[in-house]
Image (cartoon, rainbow, N blue to C red):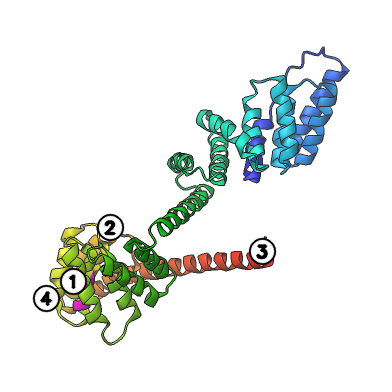
Amino acid sequence: MRLLGFLLACSVLVWPCPDTGLAVDETAVEIQRHAEQARLALSQNDLERAEQEYEAILKLDPQNASIYTALGVAFYGSGKPADAESALRTALRLDPNQSQAEAFLGLAESELGHCQEATPVLTRQFNSQHDPKLRRLLGLNLLNCHLTSSNFDSAIEVARTLRQSYPDDPDVLYTLAGLYTRLWDSVASDLMEKHPESYRVHQLAGEVMEAQGRTDRAIKEYQLALKQNPKIPQVNNRIGRLILLAGGPDANRNALERFQQELAVNPRDASSEYWIGVIDTDVHALPEAVKHFERAKELDPQFAQAYVGLAKVFLQQKQPAKAVEELQQAIQLSPESSTAHYELMEAYRDQGRLADAQREMALFQKLQKAEAESFRSRLDSLLSGQAKNVKNPD
């Protein structure tokens, strides 16, 4: 954040030397020379030299609030929040209207861990700041201060504004992920502490085990939740999918029972209809599979997988034209679905449309490569982070 603050600071600090009230004499000329050198240093990302030039100006003109602001921002960009705080406080003492000084004072205080002092400043500046880069930086620091004090209500409000203003910013998304993780931990802890025997505790434990890939434990926790409340929606569906994932000779039969139980509780569950269709396709009960895929589409017209499932049945029934129609709709709903492009390749090939089939095969391979690279990138990043933590546990 500090580096980003400096990149912003460069645009803030490159100003003409302010009016000092001095006559055009040697002192004024010297001040102008140092100001030009500071501008040159900033253009070369040399913050240390810029700081030296600002300090030289202040020896000649110690009441110059603007230069104290510039020096404070340079200190902040250099990763010297304590020095920045001192310079910025001096700027505000000389001129309380130095808005830029107040903004960076809040940033410096937050980095020093003085969130109690920083929060009102950051809040005021975040709500009034028009520069998008500075406002973003203020919002991120304000959100971190709210998290430090476990003020989740205020954190959520700031997070909502940041997400609306900077929807694709990686630092914003990362900080929001931290907020949501903290919220999840806090609420889950309250749930387990206040209602340890609740079926919701078992349901929550099942979701955690499922996310960790501990299939058997997840199923057991879900079963304990259902034992207390057989009508919890989506839990039978989750068990059914986990059974299919684990495989085994009775997987289809056991999973089918779960999806049917889900539909008994939740008759409009498109996902369970879809998975019953998948099981029917696997056992070659194709007319029944068509009914379930059509039902899934009816319940959720945006459910791209249902169109793909239906297309696979049509391909087995030697009806490639119908399959193409379903797959084109699936791709319209989910353009990045590699499975849909692969099945469309198969359908085109069955129709003898070899050029179209080659095009879809190329798209399929491109999407698969992107998916694999994305996975490897995320995995490498995770492992790299873990290795760093092992080397630097603090």
Q: Secondary structure at mark 1?
A: helix
| Amino acid type, callout 2 | Leu
**Quick one: label 3 or label 4, which is nearer the N terminus?**
4
| Region in magenta | 275-280
Count neighbours of disc 1 (C-alpha within 10 A) and say few if under 14, some if 14 to 19, many if 20 or more: some
Name which residue lies at 45% across and 57% down.
Answer: 189
Image mark for residue 333: 2
Q: Secondary structure at mark 4?
A: helix
How far apart are labels 4 and 1 at the CA level? 18 Å
Image mark for residue 393: 3
How far apart are labels 3 and 4 at the CA level? 59 Å
**Quick one: label 4 or label 2, which is nearer the N terminus?**
4
Residue bearing the label numbered 4? 287
| Amino acid type, callout 1 | Gln
**x%, y% of residue 216?**
37, 77
Instruction: Judge depth for marks 1 and 2 and give the one in front.
Output: 1
- Magenta part, dominant SS: helix
| Amino acid type, callout 3 | Pro
Count neighbours of disc 4 (C-alpha within 10 A) and say few if under 14, some if 14 to 19, many if 20 or more: few
Instruction: Judge depth for marks 3 and 4 and give the one in front.
Output: 3
Residue 135 figure quarter: top right
Q: Which residue is more in the foreground, 155 or 52?
A: 155
Instruction: Judge depth for marks 2 and 3 and give the one in front.
Output: 3
Count neighbours of disc 3 (C-alpha within 10 A) and say few if under 14, some if 14 to 19, many if 20 or more: few
How far apart are labels 2 and 3 at the CA level? 45 Å
Residue 386 shows in the view: yes
Image height of 49 relative to 250, above or below: above
